[in-house]
Every structure is written in structure tokens, then in C-alpha cells.
Image (cartoon, rainbow, N blue to C red):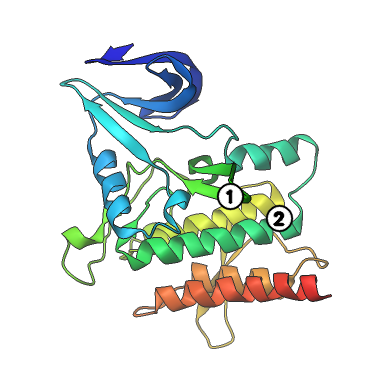
Amino acid sequence: MSSGRTKYQITGCAGQGGFAQVYKAYFNCNPDDVVALKIQKPAFPWEFYMYRELDQRISDKERSSFGFAQRMHLYSDCSILVCNYLANGTLQDAINSYAALGKSMEEVLCIYYTIEMLYMLESLHDVGIIHGDFKPDNLLIRYSRSGPWLDQGLCLVDWGRGIDLHLFPDNMEFKGDCRTSGFRCVEMQENKPWTFQVDTYGLCVIVHMMLHNSYMEIDKKPSPDGGYVYLPKSSLKRYWKVELWKNLFVKLLNSNPGYNEKKLLQDLRESFQEYMLSMCVA
């Protein structure tokens, strides 16, 4: 296919969702220049806008964790978003590969990815951006060698449901629901206002999937103070770091009005990092 003077040689389908198809292609027929083409009908320029806001707000050190869009070709009936191509699959693929063997991801790897996701949301929310569709299908495995350094981790893509809080008044809250997704945060389920909870709930679901190979279901349980607390129905295995995981689920599934979300994510991240460091010392 071609767009103006630019030509793309499509070599295969890289993914397909409910609203778009993604293809692997050679830019100007050069096999050393591989891109991902996201084709949407009707045209959807919002996602390109979100990528450009990420370019401006996210530091160079952290930018590789949030995907790149090179350009967009916009037509009356469709749009073609040209993105960097990552060849190592998604976090969902990694979870599925363990499930196919009848296993769950090793706990230490779950902790590694959890630290990265917490830092990812900490950075993202701090600059006034909500992803809105935080799930393992949208987290690509990033693995490349740049000079003497190894760059590996996760890369968050698919910004079609992204929210730019800078376009709204300060302390804006939302009451919309997303019934097309199983990743509906507690606030959506209870018809309460939400902001960052849509992403932090998604993180909890991903952690649950890594640990248990299943989607998270939650229970509303009485708490000692006479209120209630939401927790996953699935039990944590006794040989896991139970207190670490329980603390994460309790804190992220039960946010209080006026809570300091950035500090909460930072404290959780540091608790997992301290455990990882203690393993190295031991």
C-alpha cells in the first residue's frame, strides 16, 4: 500500500482488536525499517494526539515505556497510525505461554513487571494522562540492545481511550462506564466518580493474571473498622510474599477520597523494590 510518496509493504497481521487492525510492514519496502500500521475505520486522530502529548510530557529517560507514533495518514473514511514495531509479543502472550504449560509466571518475574507497571502509572498520572485501557494486551515486551546496554521491560501502547486531564478543570472526576471491557474499576461498578482508578484497577487485574492465570473477581468483605474492603476472591499461596501482594490489592482496590495517588504508587513500588534488593543481598 502507499500513502502519497510513502510506500508500505505489508508482511503480515500483527494484531486485531474490536476497533482496529494492526499490520507489520516495511517502510518504503526496506526490510531493515519495520513499522506497525494501525488502520482504523472511521478515522481516529485522537490517538495520534495522545502520542504527541506523551512526547512533550514524558522525560526521555522514561519515554520508551509508552510507545512511539511516527506519523498518521488521515483520510475521510479511515486513518493509518504508523508506530514503532516491537517483535517480542505482549504481556498477555507471556501469560498465555505459562498457562499453556499448566504453570503460572514465577513470582520474582511478577514482582519485576509489577514494579515497572507501578512506575509507569506513577510517571503517567503525574503528567495528567490516564491510559484508560490498561491491560496485558496493550503492554508489549520491550527487549533491545542499544550499544553496551540492554533495554528491556514493558511498553504501553493503544492510546485510543486515553484521557488528557489538562483539557479539564482541576480535580475533574468522571462517571462514565466501560461495559465493553472486563476491566471495570470498583468505582465504575458502583457508579461512583473515578479518575486514575481505571488504570490502577487494570494493574491489579494484570497482577492477578500473572499470579493465577485467570481474570480477577472481587469480593466486598467487612473490615475491622466497621466498613468494608474489596479483595480478590482467589487466595494467595502461602509461599508467596503474601503481605506485599495483599497490601497492593487492598490499597489499589480501595482508594479513599482525596488520597495521594502518586505517593501511594511510589510507596507500593518501593516496597517491592526493597524486597528485590533484599533478595540480592541474601
Q: Is residue 171 left or right of residue 87?
A: left
Q: Position of residue 21 (x, y in %)?
A: 40, 24
What is the quadrant of residue 101 in the picture? Answer: top right
Residue that label 2 marks: 109
Q: Position of residue 204 (x, y in %)?
A: 55, 59
Relative vertical location of residue 184 with respect to residue 191 in this rendering, above or below:
above
Indicate the secondary structure of the residue bearing disc 1.
strand
Q: Is residue 12 left or right of residue 111?
A: left
Q: CA distance from mark 2 to mark 1?
A: 16 Å
Q: Position of residue 221 (x, y in %)?
A: 58, 72
Residue that label 1 marks: 151
Relative vertical location of residue 92 with respect to residue 270 in this rendering, above or below:
above
x 35%, y 68%: residue: 126
Q: Amino acid at mark 1?
A: Asp
x 50%, y 47%: residue: 155
Q: Nearer the viewer, residue 204 or 81?
A: 81
x 37%, y 58%: residue: 188
Q: Amino acid at mark 2?
A: Leu
